[in-house]
Amino acid sequence: MVNLKKYNALSRYFVLILTVFTLLSCAEKKLYVDKIEGKQIPVTESFSQTQSIEDFIAPYRKHIDDDLNTVLAYAPESIDKKGMWQTKIGNLQSTVTLASSNKIFQMRENKSVDICLLNNGGIRAIINKGNITTRTAFELMPFENNLVVVALKGEQIVEMVNYIIEKKTPHPLAGLTFTIDKNNVAKNILVQNKPLDLQKTYYVATNDYLYNGGDNMNFFKKSTAVFDLDYKVRNVWVDYFKEVDTIPILTDIRIVKEN
Amino acid sequence: MKRRDFIQKTATGSAILALPSLPLMSFGKPDIKHLTILHTNDVHSHIDPFPADDSRNPNKGGVSRRASLIDSIRKENPNVLLLDAGDIFQGTPYFNYYGGELEFKLMSMLKYDLATMGNHDFDNGIEGFYAQLPHAKFDFVSANYDFKNTILNEIVKPYKVFNKGGIKIGVFGLGIKLEGLVDKKMYQETVYNNPIETAEEMTRILKHEEKCDLIICLSHLGYHYQNAPENISDLNLAKKTKDIDLIIGGHTHTFLEKPTIVLNKMGEQTLVNQVGCYGINLGRIDFYFDYNKNKTHEGRTIVV
């Protein structure tokens, strides 16, 4: 206890020094960036796995794998995207989608879906010959897009036909058939096997991406009504695969090109 | 000796010992001068590494490997900020099955500090994003999305200030225009504001009000648009603003050989980086600080 006073005095003196230093450094010293080094590090096998993270992921991974690997159907041959005006996979998707959207639309609105138009770019994989699993549906359609039914006048169906002729892309198409003559003009336009009526309202199943202007399908913007089916495009595939055993190969010609 | 005396004596003694380094200790800042920024972007739910037979990225990526890489860096320098520039969601069934829960939980285990929102983070709607937030132990920032009339109001803030060993780091977020890219029913009443004007306001606040030593922009605007070079992008943002030290970008899945040095509107060097996508790479930017009287922005050395 004897020395305590001395220490107190010293520490008071010290506080004074500290204050002066602080004031000085406030005036003069500022933090600044002297040097920057930037690089990127590839994440490769050279870094070991972290066991705690692996263990955490494992049950999630197992649940997904078990579900995705479930065999739902069988493809007798590969169903691919080859073709100028229509493809095997486009024919299948549009036919299946027309049927399943029609089922919901009948129930909810008591009306029939006449046409289905989707986009070729929205099919992200093909169906290989052999077993089809839930994983196949995820590969075909990784996005979360929904089905919608759009009401269009006959005039817009003509715009749709002209769009298809102009873009020369085999978009999945069902319920609508036509012929392109040698002058690149459409003729013999049939909806559900009946001649197109310009005054009539037709119901077209598509996805919300296209309805919102995707792929420049601007004719959808002139719709008089739209119905969200709250049905994911992927789930159309999943439900269809669950329903069928062997997938049919649809090679019917929906767009005829005259030379 | 009584315990109190001992403490007093020891305290004074160590204060004297600390005298030589006093200038650095002022403002109560300890003597740390090295900050490491680690970053990812557009991981898109890629939790597992690509399979060995993948045609493009065999055996690359994987959260569990990224974790050990980040761990080793934290051991080398504990002053780390781990950031993500958006599009955490969408790309593997992990997202389709769990809606982003696993992504957020893993990022929390890796101790991410902050992220911004990419357009795909709206893929399950603003409610879908909100529903997963309890799984994230890190915050989200976005300065040019006005969430006032949405459930994210006051939850996603414009910026966040970190204090890492006495260094103040301000990080603000910028998001891409949602109209035409994301369905309106997903982003609802989110208002998109001009990124450059927003960035000017943010840098003013972070530099002059928050008195940050370093300003970082977490951007999901995209690196550069070759077919529309005038569109807002990270390169244009860097050129047209000032006081941003680093822009960490995303959206365009741009693989850069090294970070890009851009001269800002004051002619000062700023850094733009993006590390591709899917967790294939981790970005690392090291800042070395010093105290000096008259040293300015131009005095810095950038090694890339």
Image (spheres, helix red, strand yellow):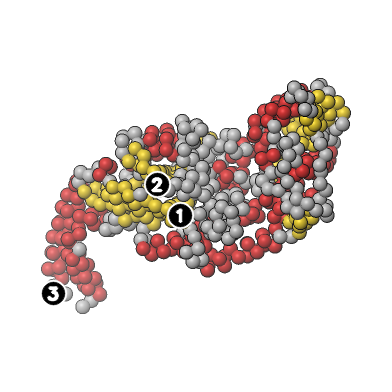
Q: Earlier in the sequence, mark 1 or mark 2?
A: 2
Q: Is residue A22 in sight in this rendering?
A: yes
Q: Residue B239 location, x and y as percent?
A: 38, 35
* Label 2: how many Cα within 10 Å (few below 14, some 14–19, many 20+): many
Disc number placed over residue A211 in the picture, else none? none
Judged by depth in the image, the label closer to the viewer, 2 or 3, is 2
Q: Secondary structure at mark 3?
A: loop
Q: Residue A222 location, x and y as percent?
A: 70, 25
Q: Residue at x 13, y 74 (%)?
A: A2
> Which residue lies under the disc numbered 3?
A2
Q: CA distance from mark 2 to mark 3?
A: 64 Å
Chain of residue at mark 2: B
Disc number placed over residue B282 in the picture, else none? 1
The foreground one among A9 and B108 is: B108
- Amino acid found under the numbered disc labelled 3: Val
- Amino acid found under the numbered disc labelled 2: Pro
Q: Quadrant of residue B23?
A: bottom left
The foreground one among A31 and A5 is: A31
Q: Is residue B146 in sight in this rendering?
A: no
Q: Residue B95 location, x and y as percent?
A: 62, 53
Q: Is B231 on the left-hand or right-hand side of A9? A: right
Q: Residue at x 17, y 64 (%)?
A: B16
Chain of residue at mark 3: A
Q: Residue at x 28, y 42 (%)?
A: B297
- Amino acid found under the numbered disc labelled 1: Leu
Q: Residue at x 54, y 59 (%)?
A: B59
Q: How many marks?
A: 3
- In the rendered image of this protein, does residue A247 appear above or below residue A109? below
The foreground one among B38 and A1 is: B38
Q: Secondary structure at mark 1?
A: strand
Q: Residue B271 location, x and y as percent?
A: 37, 44
Query: In which quadrant will I find the N terminus of chain B?
Result: bottom left
